[in-house]
Image (cartoon, helix red, strand yellow):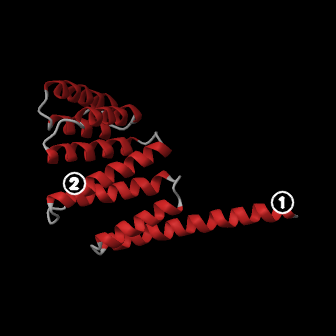
Amino acid sequence: TLGISVVVCIGLICSIKEISAEYYYQQAIIAQSKGDMEKAIENYQSAVLEKPYEYAYSQGFGDFALKQSANKNLKPAVQQKMLILAISNYEKALEINKHHPSIYFNLATAELRLNASLSSKGKSITAMNHLSEAVKRAINNPLYPYQSAKSLLNLNDQEALLIAKDYLEKALQIRPA
């Protein structure tokens, strides 16, 4: 009976953590919809802390930060911090789950935006690798090759243009015009 009690307690603790993480995640979404960025960040952080091995909470936090980084009402320094926060959360999501093309694509988007804001080419290769991974994992989804090509076209780099052409061809192979 002691063994059963231990199993029941562990199950109860896990359930409470799941409920708590989901509560914080929903509170973050509500705060975001109300424009309360600080409260949203606090709740996203709490959700991730409650369930650190659930990739969806890190990805959701990254999505929030990436979206906020495009907010023209924020100072450039705050936009950059949001991009760094997005990158950090996408990397955490990838540590847990390496199979979702959206994580790779959004990570690359954040890296490219940060790179552009810093006028640096340091993250371009990393971002291009992440775009490649997104395309590779989106076997039957033309969205990722198409969107990745659009991202590469903005780099104004000859190699990136050739890769963009390949991605556009791949998108057409998946779903012909």
Picture coordinates of residue 38 (x, y %)?
A: 31, 71
Q: Is residue 175 above or below residue 41?
A: above
Q: Earlier in the sequence, mark 1 or mark 2?
A: 1
In which quadrant will I find the N terminus? bottom right
Residue shown at 15% from the left, 46% from the top:
118
Residue shown at 20% from the left, 35% from the top:
152
Q: Is residue 70 visible?
A: no
Picture coordinates of residue 100 (x, y %)?
A: 43, 42
Horizontally, is 109 left or right of 140 in the view?
left
Where residue 3 is drawn, which disc sits there? 1
Q: Is residue 52 above or below residue 8?
A: above
Picture coordinates of residue 113 (x, y %)?
A: 20, 47
Of residues 66 and 84, the one drawn nearer to the viewer in this rendering: 84
Of residues 146 and 92, the one drawn nearer to the viewer in this rendering: 92
Q: In the picture, residue 143 is in which quadrant?
A: top left
The residue labelled by disc 2 is 80
